[in-house]
Structures are given as C-alpha cells and as structure tokens.
Image (cartoon, rainbow, N blue to C red):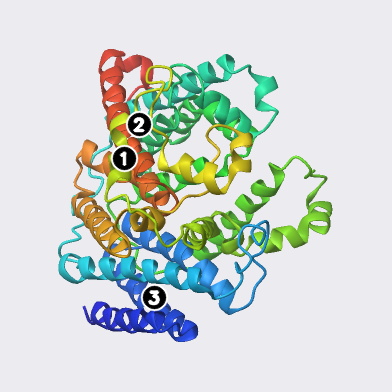
Amino acid sequence: MIQIFTALVFCVLSLFAIVFEWFEAALFSSLLSYFLLVYRTLKTTGLNSVLFLFIILFGLYGYSVPVSVFFELDIGWHRVAKIATWQEADASLFSYLLSNQLALFAILLVFLFFVNRKTMHISKTGNATTKFTYYRFAVVAGIISSLSELLNFVRVGGWDTLLIGKAHYQGAVNDLVLNIPYEGFFYISAALFSQFFGSLDLKIRHTGYLINYLLSISFVLFIFLAIGERGSLLVAIVIFGLGFTINQRITSVKPLYAIALALLYMAFNVLTLLREKEVEYNGIKDFYVTYGKRLNKLMNPANTEFGSPALNYRIFIKRKGGDYDYKYGYTYTELFWAFVPTYVYASKPKSIIYEFRDTYFAERKEQGSTSGTGFSSLMEAYMNFGYFGPFIVYLLTIFTLVYLENKKGRDRLLVNLLYLVSFNIFLIYSRSASQYILYNVVLYGVQIIIVVVASKIIPKKILMPREP
C-alpha cells in the first residue's frame, strides 16, 4: 500500500503547484502520482481488468494534451481556430489540470481503503466446466444484433445512405422511428462467447463454434468495416480478451503485449484516415508516402479523440463568463427523458451534449443529428458543482467499478456479463455526458434480459452443434 500513500503525497503536491500555476512542477508531480497508481492497479487486479483499462484511459484523456504542451508538440490540428492558446499553458489548461487532479485524488482515496489483492478476489474454480449455455446465448445475441442492424440498414436507404459517410449513416439510423440499438447485443455476444471459448477443453475442436459465431455477427461486422467504425470493433476485441481471461490475473507486461497494442493502435489510426473522403488506399507503400505525416500526427493521442475532452473543457472555461450559473446536478437527471423519442415528446429538453455542441461547435450539427464533440465528464462535473464536482463524481464512479471488479470471475453469468459490458461504459466515460452513460447502463440491462428470454424460447438443437 506504500505506492498509494506515495501517490497521494505527489497528488497533493501537484494540487499546490497547480494553484500557484507552476506548470512543470504540477505536471511532473501529477504524472508521478498517476504512474504509481497504474503500477498498483497492475499488481492488484492485473492488466486484463476493466479497472486497469479505466486507469489507463484516464491517463490518456487526462495527460495527452498537457504533456504535448510541455514538449511543444503540434496539437493545433483544427483546434487553434477554436481556442488561440490551445498549445499554451494558459488559465484554461490549469483549470483542466485542477479538475483532473481532483478526480485522481478521489480515485486514490478509493484505492487506499478498498483495493488490495485480498478484496480483488479471483475465483479458484477457473473454467472447470464447458459453458455451452454461454455459447447458446452468444449466438442468439449475435443474431439479434445482425438482424437489428440489417433492419436499420434497409430502413435508412441501404447502400446509398451508407456510402455518404459514417456520421450521416449513424445520424440517419438514430433519426429512425423505433430504431433498434444493435451495438449492445453485439457487445453482449462478444462477452458471452469469450467466456465459452475460454472454457473449452483443448481437445475439443474450436473451429465449428467460431465459424457459427462469426456468422451470427457477420452483418454487424460488415457495417463496421464499411463505415470505418473502429471504436466498436476495438470494444468488442477488448471485451473478448477480458472474458477469455476472466479467471486469471495478468500482472506482468510482456513485450508481445506491447507490440500487439502498438500495431493495433496504428491499425485503428489507419482506419481513421481511410474513412475520410479524400483519402485513397493504393497499397501500403503509396499510402504511407502520401499520408505518412498525417499518420504520424495521429500517433500522438492528443491529436485523436483523447484530446477532445480537454478541448471541450478549455473552450468552455474560456467562454463561460464570470456569471456562469452552475446546474447543481440537473444534467445528471437527463436520464429520465433519455428513452423518450422526440416524436413522442416534441418539447423534449436538449441533452447537455447537444446543447454544448450547438453553442461551441455549431458546424458539427450539419454532419448529422448524433454528431458530437467528444464531451467531457470532468466538464460536466464542473458545470454542476464547480471544482467539487470532479472529486465527488469520480469518487462514486471508481467505487462502483471497484465493486464490479470484486464480484467478477465467480462463474455467475449475469455478474460476469455486467462486468464485461461495463468496459464500454467506462471506455466512453471520460468523453461522454452522464445521460449517455446511464442510458447505456439501463439499455444493456434490458438487452441482456431479451437475450436470455430469446435463448430460452429457441430450441437448443437449433442454436448449437452437437455437444462432444
């Protein structure tokens, strides 16, 4: 526990440095505190845990911009026009650092009292039995996901709409009356199949099960690849990895893991470029010669979606004015009307996500009704409670995650499933508003129930091959 005590000391030192606007000292102390937290999380829950991944994401979102400013890296891509001091350590950056550091302080307090190897229990039973029930549920969830997206695809106009672009296609699907949310079913299927696949005896042939499962999710995969939806694919891959190793604790980082992660990160940056209309692929060599500089810039997380929350936060701080009226928790009640479509409730209040977008990024509205800006949970917390907000909101958030982490890996289908799909919730946490987070929590719960009910109705012999 010495790491957490030391991390708390550096965290407090960083808070003092931020107050006095000592940028280098603040950033150095904060990074030391953060890396001690990362080390403690790795040794306590392992790198194959939602908690560890959340901490890594917290760092990428929280530090990519400040570190880039410190090293004077080029992060002005499309952003200097929005905030002239974007690449400088101005008052808005210090405000962002303060909110981020208060959130880190809350995380460290939860670790101090609730996180250790004893409380983060790993089941000793392991995958003692083959989970054929998980396989059946996984195929059902995959079929529901593909059929749902196929129906959406047909209703929005098929190929003609798809070829216009990702934002337009997703906006068209979102605007459908009674559109079917398919991504949750896709993640549920990945979570279930990963646990089944991990439980198979090595003597059993895996190929047939894998092919059947891939067929069940084939249309969703096609749509993701067609529109360059790299995020959902990455989420599914990570959920699969977490589920496959849910009864293990991997506490060392092997070179192979680092290489695989680097290649995956580069591949998804390539996908980011390919989904832009003016980018053409004519082979690896020509692609790198033509777009190498843009690809290299994307390798800095601050030039990707990881820099968006800082941009949103700093623009808000710059323009909010001195007479800003805090919302005192109002935005956290938006869940109550999140499930009500506008064609039923015409005067439905605008979500804080789109209220912010329309105020500061009006041009994004033209890209589609669902086009966002990569919001910021830190900014929403500040909007509601000032600097006290990031501390209390992250305190509650990390406590919830620690509770889920404690309950995983005990051969209970519902608990493990909730834990695995929660990755997508915590993945988007730093760049989403509370309405979207809570909406997904409720939606995933409903979709899990639908999968279980459907699996009970459909005869077993239709869904799975003969058991060995």
Earlier-in-chain disc, 2 versus 1 = 2
- Which one is in front, 150 or 328? 328
Q: Is residue 118 visible?
A: yes
Task: Say whether disc 2 or disc 3 marks the residue closer to the N-terminus.
Answer: 3
Secondary structure at badge 1 equals helix
Instruction: State the image quarter where residue 293 is shown.
Output: bottom right
CA distance for labels 2 and 1: 9 Å
Query: What residue is shown with label 1?
Result: 438
x, y percent for residue 22: 46, 85
Q: Amino acid at mark 1?
A: Leu
Q: Nearer the viewer, mark 1 or mark 3?
A: 1
Is the C-beta separation of discs 2 and 1 under 8 Å? Answer: yes
Q: Position of residue 237 (x, y in %)?
A: 47, 45
Query: Which quarter of the figure is the N terminus placed in?
Result: bottom left
Dot 2 corresponds to which residue? Answer: 338
The image shows residue 26, relative to residue 62, as above or below, that is below
Picture disc at residue 35: 3
